[in-house]
Amino acid sequence: MNWPESASLLAPLAAWFDRNRRTLPWRAEDLSKPHPDPYAVLVSELMLQQTQVATVIPYFQRWMEGFPDAATLARADADALHKAWEGLGYYRRARHLQAAAQKIAEHGWPADLEGLLTLPGLGPYTAAAVASIAFQQPEAALDGNAFRVLARVLGLEDDPTRHAKSLRHWLKPALETLGPSRLTQAVMELGALVCTPSPRCEQCPLAACCEARRMDATERIPLKKDRAPQKESEIWLLAIRAQGRWLLRPPASKGLLAGLWSWPVLPLEKPVANLAAEPQQPFGLESWRSWPGWTQVYSHRKERIQPLALEWSEAFPVAQLRWVEEETLRTLPMGKRDQRLRELLDTSSQGLEAPPIARLLRRLSSMEAGELV
Ligand code: SF4
């Protein structure tokens, strides 16, 4: 690779960061020393995976109050853990964080990058970020922001992740000269504030040496990958209540919804044409409420959701589901979709004109174990 020497090329970026760095609750004052609380760095890095800084700040602060160190987090119970993460999404991160804390509480912090990579939830980016920010080790942390900045500065026109190994090697002298924690966070800060997908090159400390800018190619660098089309599904999201208790699905031990309680769902069927011919209140249904639906977007799929609350005269057994007391409902950790229905329950119904309720109820009455999931 015929790239310019990294330490002198990136020196203006480090100086810019000293003047422009944001105050963040997990950021140390003095970036020339190891971080006084490596656990805070670990928590922030796990939270910042897939999530914006502004969203993370209040979660981080609450988390550090509830679980101030690795030993406390190691002992936390699963519902408390997921409740503290509620709304942040990608709940696997919370479980990884606890598993990492258990390892740290038992064996202490690993000494180097290889050791950090053995902690649950730490891939090459997060392990290098913790090594450099918490422990001042010259390890290059390459995430989407860093790849974008470096691809533009160096004019990499193909997929920059293909150059990961070379970029790590190239960055090492700059990390050693300009300071691992300082330079790692400077690259992150530039990617977050200036070298964004639509870059503000006129404010950039690297404008004079940036290849993408020189080539007028900031639009096409970095190369955009084709995204697979998102799968879509349509569901009823059902809040079913009987005798003061709610019907919920307990947390699975693995998968997307692990650790989270959720409402039962049924695939949404096409509206029934002739509701007049349908019985409206079969088998113990006392009343129902509905609200306008919404679309929930996940990383690889979308769900078109129709929320519905049903009041039953008597509880009925359903395999794999559990009846939960009214006061317990608020305390249980739920994903965003299910939280939204929980909040709707406190609002008045904005009923659909004619939900295909009779047909839905017939399905409920004849459902077999596993159909209502
Ligand atoms: S000059 Fe523009 S494209 Fe180049 S690094 Fe700076 S902000 Fe990014």
Image: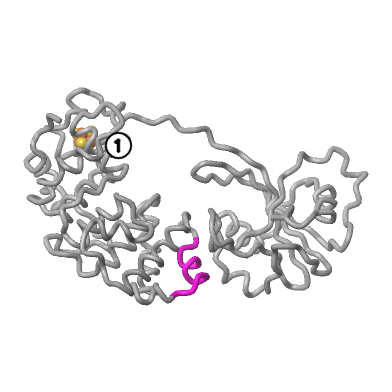
Q: Name the residue under label 1.
A: 161
**Observer-nearest residue: 43 or 272?**
43
**Observer-nearest residue: 112 or 177?**
112
Q: Residues within 10 Å of mark 1 (few under 14, many from 20)?
A: some
Label the magenta part by its dominant secondary structure.
helix
| Three-letter code, disc 1 | Thr
In the image, 248: left or right of 242? left
Name the quarter showing ligand 1: top left
Q: Where, quadrant-wise, is the C terminus in this rendering? A: bottom right
Q: In the rendered view, would you say 34 is above or below 74?
A: above
Q: In the rendered view, would you say 52 is above or below 144?
A: below
The reply to whether residue 201 is in sight is no
**Residue 71 location (% of width, % of height):** 35, 76
The reply to whether residue 249 is in sight is yes
**Observer-nearest residue: 160 or 193?**
160
The quadrant holding residue 251 is bottom right
